[in-house]
Image (cartoon, grey):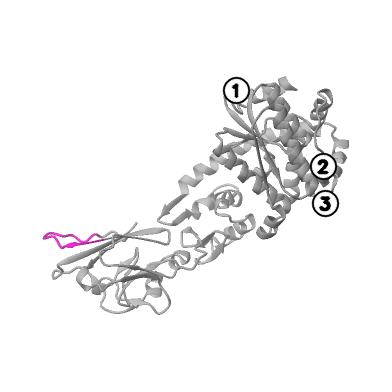
């Protein structure tokens, strides 16, 4: 198995002999075998162990066992204890998901602090098989069918090639002691139910189930790579940004093959679900204005684009601009202010994100806030009042962008609908002597 181990690392280019690897070691058979292989191969490694505090004294015994391994192999040891059950309850997630989140965050922290190149976990063929079946059972896209990747960022799986039976043969042959997790026998965990009940039945149909699934996974990985190259090309062709907004030309989506699948791949980075994507496709030929919300973003079907914005989950109140202040950070952007004497030949900028004002008409401090119903101003070029809500509708601001529009006011009067238009009463005229320029960055 040692020769297969080294061949696999070299073939998949997991790491080079001079690199430093942090091994995630639970004390179970798989991780102990991984340790032994690293030691026999004379590789540079350390051991990291997580005590999840879920099995009382048994968890503490696992920790002590892992510590003894570091003495045996004469390598560094890193250990931490988590309040896993409390974290799971707090985050409203399963215990297994909580443990996974906690351990990978901690592994990465240790990797960075102590100069390791990669974190190695002891996932193997059977784990890949179980993951594929678990994903299929719950429903998945193409990404869920590749199972556990051999290399994913800073995470590597050096014994991915091995079957559970081969790992067991190795511990028998080398007389290796390991810790058995009693929870592995409990079918209350979904993965254990698959391992203990479902997989044995499927192996009656195909005794070589693990190898068959691995071959399928390798083919899926190749297809996935081709698919995502096409998706990224499509993203570059039909999406663009303007400030905080992301625009997506949905007319182009309607012309591609499998529009629902491709649109979902474009939208899932904004946490929209597949079922939401189906609904979005269903309204593309309908009236503009339909809004969809993910946990992190809003999406509005506008006239020719889908407009995506980060949701501001915390309510923005107001901020002040003091006289002489040069910058103000607000709502993910920045306002830059400068006041200067009007030059002899001055041309007023026409760029919408710059407000050019008669400085002597302003009263400080200026206020920056979101617009609300009832707000009005006299848009540049007009001497009559217009409600901000009507103005934004007339200039066809998408609904989710409309909600985020800021106003700058002076003594209660609107000076500028930021990024849109100034108030006519504050414009620069022939009589202006001092200019205030405010730019939205």
Residue 283 placement, left or right of 139: left
Residue under numbered circle 2: 195
Residue 160 in view (yes/no): no
Q: Secondary structure at mark 3?
A: loop
Tag 3: Cα neighbours inside 10 Å, few (<14), some, or many (≥20)? Answer: few
341 in the magenta segment: yes
Marks 1 and 3, the one that precedes in the sequence:
1
Q: Is residue 130 above or below residue 332?
A: above
Residue extending furthest toward the top:
3
**Of 377 and 409, which appears nearest the observer?**
409
Residue 128 is situated, as x and y percent measured from the top left of the image, at: 73, 38
Residue 66 placement, left or right of 12: right
Disc 2/disc 1 C-alpha distance (Å) = 34 Å
Marks 2 and 3, the one that precedes in the sequence:
3
Q: Residue at x 70, y 31 (%)?
A: 70
Marks 2 and 1, the one that precedes in the sequence:
1
Magenta region: which residues?
338-349
The quarter of the image holding the C terminus is bottom left
Residue under numbered circle 1: 17
Tag 1: Cα neighbours inside 10 Å, few (<14), some, or many (≥20)? Answer: few
Residue 292 is situated, as x and y percent measured from the top left of the image, at: 56, 63
Disc 2/disc 3 C-alpha distance (Å) = 12 Å
Circles 2 and 1, Cβ within 8 Å, touching? The answer is no
Tag 2: Cα neighbours inside 10 Å, few (<14), some, or many (≥20)? Answer: some
Q: Is residue 95 above or below residue 227?
A: below
In the rendered picture of this protein, how many numbered marks are placed on residues? 3
Residue under numbered circle 3: 188
* SS majority, magenta: loop
Q: Residue at x 11, y 60 (%)?
A: 344
Q: Quadrant of residue 405?
A: bottom left
Residue 370 is situated, as x and y percent measured from the top left of the image, at: 41, 70
The quarter of the image holding the N terminus is top right
């Amino acid at each position: 198995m040692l020769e297969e181990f080294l061949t696999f690392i070299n073939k998949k280019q997991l790491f080079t002999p001079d690199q430093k690897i942090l091994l995630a070691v639970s004390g179970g058979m798989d991780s102990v075998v991984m340790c032994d292989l690293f030691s026999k191969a004379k590789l540079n490694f350390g051991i990291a162990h997580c005590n999840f505090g879920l099995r009382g004294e048994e968890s503490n015994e696992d920790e002590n066992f892992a510590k003894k391994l570091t003495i045996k192999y004469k390598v560094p040891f890193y250990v931490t204890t988590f309040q896993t059950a409390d974290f799971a309850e707090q985050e409203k997630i399963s215990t297994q998901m909580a443990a996974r989140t906690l351990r990978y965050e901690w592994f990465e922290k240790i990797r960075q602090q102590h100069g390791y190149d990669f974190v190695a976990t002891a996932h193997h063929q059977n784990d890949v098989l179980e993951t594929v079946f678990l994903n299929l059972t719950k429903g998945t896209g193409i990404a869920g069918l590749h199972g556990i990747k051999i290399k994913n960022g800073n995470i590597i799986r050096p014994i991915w090639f091995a079957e559970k039976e081969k790992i067991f043969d190795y511990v028998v042959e080398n007389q290796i002691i390991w810790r058995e997790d009693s929870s592995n026998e409990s079918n209350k965990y979904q993965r254990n139910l698959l391992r203990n009940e479902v997989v044995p039945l499927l192996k009656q149909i195909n005794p070589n189930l693990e190898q068959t699934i691995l071959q399928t996974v390798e083919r899926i990985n190749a297809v996935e790579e081709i698919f995502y190259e096409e998706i990224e090309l499509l993203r570059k062709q039909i999406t663009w940004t303007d400030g905080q907004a992301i625009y997506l030309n949905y007319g182009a989506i309607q012309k591609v093959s499998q529009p629902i699948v491709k649109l979902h791949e474009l939208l899932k980075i904004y946490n929209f679900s597949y079922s939401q994507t189906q609904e979005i496709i269903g309204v593309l030929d309908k009236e503009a204005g339909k809004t969809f919300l993910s946990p992190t973003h809003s999406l509005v079907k506008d006239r020719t684009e889908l407009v995506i914005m980060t949701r501001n989950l915390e309510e923005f109140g107001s901020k002040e601009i003091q006289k002489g202040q040069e910058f103000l950070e607000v709502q993910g952007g920045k306002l830059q202010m400068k006041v200067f004497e009007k030059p002899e030949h001055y041309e007023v900028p026409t760029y919408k994100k710059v407000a050019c004002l008669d400085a002597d008409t302003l009263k400080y401090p200026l206020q920056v806030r979101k617009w609300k119903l009832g707000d009005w101003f006299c848009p540049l070029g007009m001497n009559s009042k217009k409600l901000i809500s009507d103005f934004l509708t007339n200039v066809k601001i998408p609904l989710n962008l409309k909600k985020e529009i800021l106003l700058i006011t002076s003594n209660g009067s609107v000076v500028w609908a930021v990024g849109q238009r100034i108030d006519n009463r504050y414009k620069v005229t022939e009589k202006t002597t001092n200019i205030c320029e405010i730019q939205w960055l």
